[in-house]
Image (cartoon, grey):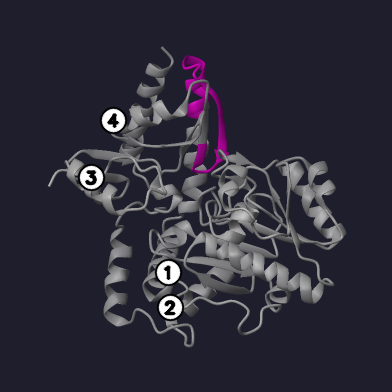
Amino acid sequence: MTMDAWVRRAEKVLMNNVRRLPLVFSRGAGANLSDLDGKEYVDFLSGIAVQALGHSHPAVVEALKKQAAKIIHVSNYFYLEEQILLAEKLTALSGLERVFFANSGAEANEAAIKLARKYGKTRMGGKYELITAYDSFHGRTMGALAATGQPKYQEAFQPLPEGFRYARYNDLASWEAAITPQTCGVLLELIQGEGGVNPVDPAFFRGLTELCQRHGLLLIIDEVQTGLGRTGKYFAWEHLGVKPQILTVAKALGGGLPIGGMLAQEDVAAAFEPGDHSSTVGGGGMAFAAALAILHIMEEEKLPERAARLGTELKNLFQTWQKELPVIKEVRGWGLLLALELRVPAQPVMRSCLEQGLIVNAVTPTAIRLVPPLNISVPDLERGLAILKRVLAAAAE
């Protein structure tokens, strides 16, 4: 059956809630994908920062085979060895003492919101409001959506849960003005991924942490997209030297398996009691096994360090391109979470890349997001860069 035939079948049964491109992929290996018609692509999107090790990494595949034959699920009434091992690994990496496992980044953020509210209710005299940033993105479930400072995602689902105020990213005065007697914490991304790959200003972040300390507010950092090596360190907050009280992760943690995590320091986590929050699967045996394999490879191959090195090299390269390709307005990002701000619409650039065998993302109307696997081979990287430069050169004409 042709790819077009599969797309027609999909359009008859899948809900029209995502603007999918008419491609059906049949195989992936490393940074390469093949569609049903046999065309090959270099993947500079990594499933939106999910495939940190690329597609179907042999170690992850083997871990999944072993886990499937061993045990998959027992419910949240019991423990799994892999669950405990993964919790130990994440708490060691983050320096936060407790972890809750969910099935996605949105669920991890929902858990963080609930924990902050419970902490505010029981330890802060009933405070419940959270301040988040305009142009943020924290998920599409109702609480996470209410925390997302983008009206275009919220309008169709009003009224949303109350208790969220919004401030301008990198504008400290805006955050200070948003604090009320009911504020219990702040929630932010250190790079706004879906907002356009907008990095936090270190000076702003220092001021925000001082505000939190002065007002006794919880600092909650959403590292669903930035976490686990993507920015050149295991966590983006490590670049800035201030550890949050609550941290969320997902995406790269499962490499395509459904898992998210919410970590918290001991005294904050203690606000949760049995029955306050839970998940029947909460990752599950397969996702725990995949995550353990992924973290092992990251550590063994020093992939956060590689992301830092490649990210610096790519930014330097793109800045060199700017001199001959004025279509590039700005280069931004950390590690291997980068964006090219363009002087032309991004959608035609993205589609032209796709036609020539490169997967990138038009993250805003004028920005291309680049998130290749952390272990992408040099030949694959060079092949993708050659396509990207050729497309940008054509766009500049």
Q: Which quadrant of the structure image shows residue 212?
A: bottom right
Above/below status of 338 relative to 127: above
Please give the residue where the numbered disc 4 appears in the rendered image.
Answer: 355
- Asked whether, in this view, residue 128 is left or right of residue 161, the answer is right
Q: Are marks 4 and 1 in contact (CB under 8 Å)?
A: no
**What residue appears at the point 83 percent right and 62 percent down from the top-left corner?**
182
- The three-letter amino acid code for the residue at tag 4 is Glu
Q: What is the secondary structure assignment of the residue under circle 2?
A: helix
Viewer-proximal residue among 264 and 281: 281
Verify whether residue 326 appears in magenta.
yes
Q: Position of residue 191 (x, y in %)?
A: 60, 45
Disc 3 crowd rating (10 Å Cα; few below 14, some 14-19, many 20+) is few
Circle nearer the N terminus (4, 2): 2
Above/below status of 92 relative to 24: below
Q: Position of residue 378 (x, y in %)?
A: 35, 39
Q: Which residues are magenta?
A: 316-338
Please give the residue where the numbered disc 3 appears in the rendered image.
Answer: 8
- The three-letter amino acid code for the residue at tag 1 is Leu
Q: Position of residue 250 (x, y in %)?
A: 50, 60
Please give the residue where the numbered disc 1 appears in the rendered image.
Answer: 292
Circle nearer the N terminus (1, 3): 3
Q: CA distance from mark 1 to mark 3?
A: 38 Å
Q: Are marks 2 and 1 in contact (CB under 8 Å)?
A: yes
Circle nearer the N terminus (2, 1): 2
Q: CA distance from mark 4 to mark 2?
A: 42 Å
Verify whether residue 341 appears in magenta.
no
Please give the residue where the numbered disc 2 appears in the rendered image.
Answer: 82
- Asked whether, in this view, residue 15 is left or right of residue 66, the answer is right
Circle nearer the N terminus (4, 3): 3
**What residue appears at the point 42 percent right and 65 percent down from the top-left corner?**
258
